[in-house]
Amino acid sequence: MKQLFITSVRDFETDTMGTVTAQEVPMPEPEADEIRIKVAYCSICGSDTHILTGSLGELTEMTRSMLPMPFGHELSGVIDKAGPKAEALGYHPGDKVVANYARYCYSCDMCRSGRPNLCPNVQFCMNGMGEYACYHVTQIHKLPQDYDLLTSALIEPLTIALGVAEQAKFSFGKSVAILGAGGIGLMLVQLARLSGASAVTVFDLVEEKRALALEMGADYAFDPREEGSVAKANACSGGPAYDCVIEGTGAMSAARLTLDLLAPDGNCVYYAMYGEHPYLDVNIHSQFYWDQKHLHGLKMGAGLFPKAIRMAPRLDLGKLIQRVHPLSRYEQAFEDLYTKKYAKVVLKMDE
């Protein structure tokens, strides 16, 4: 079977992007408590993009040591084979499913207190960009049989969007600013609308993405490079600034804007990967003591798969998928990714 591997990361000295190659690997066999999925679609994630196009900072050497590295984790498919223990739990060939790439231990304090995303023993199964992939039964979530597998490939990133929305405390009448109009950012535009937000403002460098954000329900869209964009955006918030601010670009220039956009007692969430020098200067006295601002991080959407599956029909996930390529044209898929024009690029793995 074919499996995609990252074979090099971004090289800033030569100004070259990372590389991806297809390799033939043996068909994986599920253990008794595992499931083998025939992967239908795998979406390219922002973290995949970061490895190929961005600075990995302190993770650079570790990542290079893992090359060639299988990857891909935003996937949907059909159960091809279930081990006997998994089948006894109700998972059968033909079931439509999505997978959580993180496998938690469920024995540590974090797991047992309902915070498995912070599990210190987590194992990552980054093998979704293959024709078949095996996962432990605890990583598998069944879909209703009428669900479309193409849009279901975005359920994993939807768990992130839901986790961000909950951390930021979206609710009726609140104003929301979103930095980054990628797939998750545009999901957050829709979630803000569903939650009753009074104003939704998006920042992005790419004109096409700003236009799509407006099409999907944002009230305003700004290029952060435009002079006075933060002041103009705050004037659109309905208050001194925004109750909820979301940073998903992974750019420190964007991260530095968040506190200028955040209203007193507001909630800001950072959910992106950052490269070198990921440090944010804050004024503890004025911003935290006087203005009581709240900063949060989010690592994965653990525990939110059932909610994301139920919420998926409430969002227009199909409009986020702007390019679909068969596995045989994976090189074109990554060329499209590097243009940064598209919210989501998806590979059809079962061509």
Image (spheres, rainbow, N blue to C red):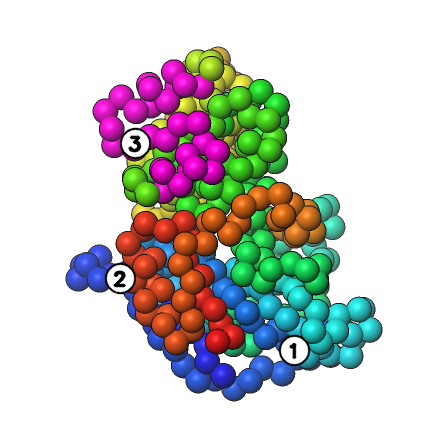
Would you name the residue on which mark 1 appears? Answer: 80
From mark 2 to mark 3, how far is it between C-alphas?
25 Å
For residue 132, say whether it is visible: yes
Magenta segment includes 221: yes
Q: Earlier in the sequence, mark 2 or mark 3?
A: 2
User: Does 110 appear above or below 147?
Assistant: above
Point out the stretch of residues depicted in magenta.
209-237
For residue 45, what is the image quadrant? bottom left
Mark 2 to mark 1 CA distance (whole Å): 35 Å
Q: Determine which residue is flagged by label 2.
A: 17
Q: Which residue is tagged 3?
A: 224
Residue 109 in view: no
User: Which mark is nearer the camera, 3 or 1?
Assistant: 1
The tag earlier along the polypeptide, 2 or 1, is 2
- Which residue type does callout 2 highlight? Met
- Is residue 33 left or right of 185 when viewed as pictured? right
Nearest the viewer among 217 and 143 is 217
- Amino acid carrying label 1: it is Asp
Kind of element beneath mark 2: loop
Q: Residue at position x 63%, y 83% from top?
A: 29
Kindly state the secondary structure of the residue where label 3 is placed.
loop
- The reply to whether callout 2 and callout 3 are in contact (CB within 8 Å) is no
The crowd level at tag 1 (other Cα within 10 Å; few <14, some 14-19, many 20+) is some
In the rendered structure, does residue 127 fall within the stretch colored magenta? Answer: no
Q: Residue at x 49, y 83 (%)?
A: 1
Q: Which mark is residue 64?
A: none
Q: Position of residue 150 (x, y in %)?
A: 54, 61
Res. 177 image quadrant: top left
